[in-house]
Amino acid sequence: MVDLQSQYAKIKDVVDSSIEEVLSSSTYINGPLVHQFQADLENYLDVKHVIPCANGTDALQIAMMGLGLEQGDEVITADFTFAATVEVIALLKLTPVLVDVEADTYNIDIDALKKAITPKTKAIVPVHLFGQVANMEAVLEIAKEHNLYVIEDNAQAIAADYTFANGTKQKAGTIGHVGTTSFFPSKNLGCYGDGGAIFTNDDDLAHTLRGIVNHGMYTRYYHDVVGVNSRLDSIQAGVLKAKLPHLDSYCEARRNAARFYNNAFANNPNIITPTTKSCGAICDTCNCHVFHQYTLQITNGKRDALHKHLLENDIPNAIYYPVPLHAQKAYADERYNENDFTVTNKLIETVISLPMHTELEKDQLEFITQTILDFV
Ligand SMILES: *Cc1c(COP(=O)(O)O)cnc(C)c1O
């Protein structure tokens, strides 16, 4: 699904010297590279505070701890996402409330979100799924009206631009009260291990979060709040610092591959290509969709057969996600009604994600698309 080897070959010198710098200085934890990467990312995202941490799941958990959410508080998020989002809500003994997604963008459905709000609701977690930002304008409006926190799960959409109705653009993850991301190797900005970060423009919240990631310490050996141990290590920071200057060109490479796929599948009645909402078609000038995944819907019932056929032809592909969260054993709840999840329930049967990365060659794209068209 990704080709990290070819990507590494192109930046090997810079990455290797970053790693050597850490090894020769022995600053494995909290070294200068962590602070440099943090500053570079703040600059790139145009956000006041980046708080690095150990992974994207921790980032979500720490964000919720920092906002002071308490047992019994309801947190609304999308039914169609990776489990990490709902996992941390449950882990903190908050009450997850899953809602359906939009049929075209696969992001949180605004009417379903409105319907799910109760006096106990404290926060909304929009997930920018597959690289496209959720309808943040509507989410912010609802949050304001009901006095709710907005925590953006931006693990899949770093570098994506969101365009407001008045034309202003803002980077995904910097729009709500707090945003989180993951630097897992296959994410759009990936390191060579685990990594994550939290973003906020709120000075007080940033201070709180910096303490929480470090055992609740604001002064050494004085623990003011219950914290965790969650760090981005210096070697990963070095890798990320080396890759960040390439992020825009990585997005462009993904966009180009997506454009090739879109064109190839445009006239097939059994295939629905991804919708790009913010700028309409795939934009030439901004990252309105960063295509963490390129996900088709196969509408003639042949999705599972296609999945098998592609594997037989050595074409990697994946079903993200095969089971909706409301139907997972760990998160099932009597309150849920199947009729409230018609879109997710349909998507799990029709979606299929194709290889999507920065190194896709034209002959690979031609082989993939032709194999699919011949079969579907
Ligand atoms: C990858 C991912 C996470 C978790 O990130 P990790 O770094 O693997 O902990 C959370 N949410 C979403 C939507 C993700 O895709």
Image (cartoon, rainbow, N blue to C red):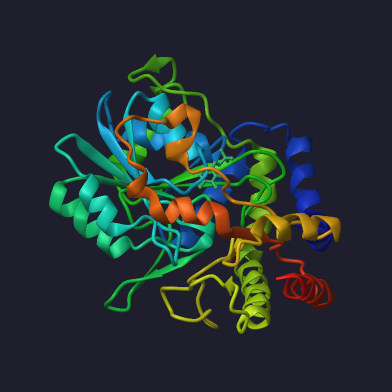
Quadrant of the image occupied by residue 216: top left
| Left or right position of 168 against 85 | left
Image coordinates of residue 322 in percent, x first then y, are: 58, 46
Q: Is residue 215 visible?
A: yes
Q: Residue furthest front?
A: 301
Q: Image check: 25 left or right of 78?
A: right
Q: Is residue 363 left or right of residue 108?
A: right
Task: Tell me the quarter of the image containing the C terminus.
Answer: bottom right
Up-down relation of residue 172 to residue 200 (above or below): below
Ligand 1: give its quadrant. Answer: top right
Quadrant of the image for the N terminus? bottom right
Who is closer to the viewer here, 267 or 261? 267
From the top left corner, tell me how far across and down residue 242 is, in percent.
69, 56
Q: Residue at x 51, y 56 (%)?
A: 347
**Quarter where residue 67 is shown:** top left
Q: Position of residue 26 (x, y in %)?
A: 73, 31
> In the figure, is residue 364 to the left or right of 340?
right
The answer, for residue 208, to whether it is visible in the render is no
Q: Residue at x 67, y 75 (%)?
A: 261
Q: Position of residue 256 (x, y in %)?
A: 66, 77
Rendered view: 337 above or below 42:
above
Of residues 268 and 1, which is closer to you in this image? 268
Q: Splitting the image into 4 quarters, where does residue 374 fall?
A: bottom right
